[in-house]
Structures are given as structure tokens and as C-alpha cells.
Image (spheres, rainbow, N blue to C red):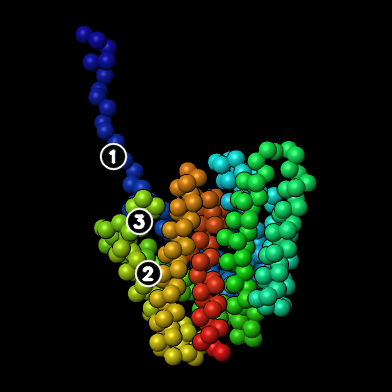
């Protein structure tokens, strides 16, 4: 008789239930962090709008850092961060003061700075063209698109305009997330983001229609149909932005762009749905209020 036969058999221990579950994230922590970010945005907008511009600049700069880090480790691309970060700060400052033309000029000057930086530093690497391509892509994808949030905040009623934009995107995220978790069965784009579902998209649309109608009607005193059109546009662009970043992450072989925000991932994982939406929100709100 072996010694092992004399020992009591191990009692199977039930697995500890995951706090993330079907949601794929720690929901209580995600809610707390999300509420904190929302409070910071609202305080900056209604207390001192230049603080909101600074907040956008810091978020974009850190988002660029996250993407540049992933590009370097996963794809071997070297994005020079100093000219990108400095250019972002200067661009947003002049865009807030001078408008959309200043945004375009700032982005162009930043692009020139990126090219000059890599030309000076180019002797260290042989694939400078690919580094420059990655840098210009990051400049357009993050810095330029997020700059429209700064333009939204610039007018006298900019705090209310920017609130409509941010809050409606949040409606899209929350509506799509909740509906997808409870009712999601049919994948929306399984090759890009397996957890996205058509049911979740429907939840995003409904939440944005309601949020856009209430927000634009209450804060900007616009007609109901303008709020519905705005909500529909936000639902589409926010979902497209989310899928676009998922496609980039899948191509680079990463789950999240970073880990700074518990329950959310990185800063870029929160900016993704806002990037595609910011220019559309700016164009629609500007047209509706003209």
C-alpha cells in the first residue's frame, strides 16, 4: 500500500467568482474611476475652462505616450515624444484662443517638428520612414481629432457644448456596455472586437438618442430633432472609434493600451470613442447654433 493511498483525497475548491464576469472588467472600480473622471471634466469646464484645455492636453499627451510605448515594444516603431507633447500643448493653447485655423496650423507645425526631429536623429535607425509614418498617424489620430474638443469649449457657452459632447459619448459607452452584457448575442465585428454586439449597438443608439435629446434641449435650447440627430451621430462615431482602436490593438497584439485607469485600461482606452466623435460633435453643434 502506498503512502499516497493513506492520505485523504483533496477536496475540490470551487473557483473564486470573477469580479469581472461577462463584463470583462471590474465594474465597481470602473464606475468609481469613471465618476471621478467625469467630475474632473465638469469641474474644469464650469470652474475655469482653460483648465479643461489643460486636462485635454494632459490626457492626449499621456495617450500618445501609451501608444508610442506599444508601437515601440510591439512593432519596433520609434515615435519621438518631445516634439509631439510640446506641439500638443502649443496647438491646443492657440486653438482655444484662435479657433479651427489655429488648430490646423498647430498640427502642421507639430508635423514639421516631428519630421525635423527624426531627420536629426535618423542616423541611429534605418527605418526612419516607418517611424515618421507612425508619428504622423499618431498626430492625426489623437492630437488632431481631440483638438475639436478644445474648439467645442472655446465659445462663451463652450462649457455647455463640451458637456453635451462628453456626456453623450458616455451615454453611448454605458448604454452599449450594459445592453451588451445583459442581452448581447449577435457579434457586431467578431474579427475586431468579439465582445461588441448588435444588441450593444442598439443600446448605444437608444441611450444617445435620449441623452442627446435631453442635453441639447436643456443646455443649448435646441430643437428635439437636432438632439436626436446629434445622438444618432454620436452613437455611430463613438462605436466606430471604439472599433478602430480595437483594430489597432489587435494588430499590435495588446489587450489594453495601458493600465493607468483601473477597470478601464489606459487613457487611450477611454479616449477611443471620443476621438472620432469630437469633430462630428463640433460640426453639428456649430451648425445647430449658428
Query: Of discs 1 and 3, which sits in the foreground?
Result: 3
Alpha carbon separation for disc pair 3 and 2: 15 Å
**Residue 112 placement (x, y as % from top left):** 73, 58
**Residue 182 placement (x, y as % from top left):** 29, 61
Residue 21 seen anywhere in this rendered image of the structure: yes
Task: Give the answer, above or below, for where 186 lies relative to 50.
Answer: above
Q: Which residue is mark 1?
A: 14
Q: Quadrant of the N terminus?
A: top left
Dot 1: within a 10 Å radius of its alpha carbon, few (fewer than 14), some, or many (20 or more) residues? few
Report the number of discs: 3
Most extreme residue toward the right, as rendered? 120
Q: Residue at x 59, y 80 (%)?
A: 159
Q: Which mark is drawn over residue 115?
A: none
Q: Residue at x 48, y 56 (%)?
A: 245
**Residue 72 placement (x, y as % from top left):** 61, 43
C-beta proximity under 8 Å, tags 1 and 2: no
Q: Which mark is drawn over residue 204?
A: 2
Q: Which residue is mark 3?
A: 189
Q: State left or right for residue 81 relative to residue 13.
A: right
Dot 2: within a 10 Å radius of its alpha carbon, few (fewer than 14), some, or many (20 or more) residues? many
C-beta proximity under 8 Å, tags 3 and 2: no
Q: Residue at x 54, y 72 (%)?
A: 279
Q: Earlier in the sequence, mark 1 or mark 3?
A: 1
Alpha carbon separation for disc pair 1 and 2: 36 Å
Query: Of discs 1 and 2, which sits in the foreground?
Result: 2
Q: Check disc 2 and report its element: helix, strand or loop.
A: helix
**Residue 168 placement (x, y as % from top left):** 46, 74
Amino acid at each position: 500500500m502506498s503512502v499516497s493511498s493513506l492520505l485523504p483525497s483533496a477536496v475540490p475548491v470551487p473557483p473564486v467568482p470573477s469580479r469581472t464576469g461577462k463584463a470583462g472588467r471590474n465594474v465597481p472600480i470602473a464606475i468609481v474611476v469613471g465618476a471621478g473622471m467625469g467630475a474632473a471634466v465638469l469641474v474644469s469646464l464650469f470652474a475655469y475652462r482653460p483648465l479643461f484645455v489643460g486636462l485635454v492636453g494632459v490626457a492626449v499627451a499621456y495617450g500618445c505616450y501609451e501608444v508610442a510605448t506599444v508601437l515601440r515594444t510591439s512593432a519596433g516603431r520609434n515615435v519621438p515624444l518631445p516634439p509631439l507633447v510640446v506641439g500638443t500643448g502649443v496647438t491646443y493653447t492657440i486653438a482655444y484662443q484662435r479657433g479651427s485655423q489655429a488648430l490646423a496650423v498647430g498640427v502642421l507645425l507639430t508635423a514639421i517638428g516631428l519630421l525635423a526631429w527624426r531627420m536629426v536623429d535618423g542616423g541611429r535607425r534605418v527605418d526612419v520612414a516607418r517611424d515618421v509614418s507612425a508619428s504622423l498617424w499618431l498626430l492625426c489620430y489623437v492630437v488632431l481629432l481631440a483638438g475639436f474638443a478644445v474648439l467645442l469649449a472655446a465659445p462663451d457657452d463652450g462649457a455647455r457644448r463640451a458637456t453635451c459632447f462628453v456626456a453623450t459619448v458616455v451615454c453611448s459607452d454605458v448604454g452599449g456596455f450594459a445592453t451588451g452584457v445583459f442581452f448581447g448575442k449577435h457579434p457586431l465585428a467578431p474579427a475586431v472586437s468579439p465582445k461588441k454586439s448588435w444588441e450593444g449597438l442598439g443600446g448605444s443608439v437608444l441611450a444617445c438618442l435620449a441623452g442627446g435629446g435631453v442635453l441639447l434641449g436643456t443646455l443649448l435650447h435646441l430643437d428635439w430633432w437636432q438632439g436626436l440627430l446629434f445622438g444618432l451621430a454620436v452613437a455611430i462615431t463613438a462605436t466606430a472609434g471604439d472599433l478602430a482602436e480595437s483594430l489597432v490593438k489587435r494588430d499590435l497584439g495588446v489587450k489594453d493600451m495601458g493600465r493607468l485607469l483601473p477597470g478601464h485600461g489606459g487613457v487611450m482606452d477611454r479616449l477611443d470613442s471620443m476621438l472620432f466623435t469630437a469633430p462630428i460633435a463640433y460640426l453639428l453643434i456649430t451648425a445647430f447654433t449658428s
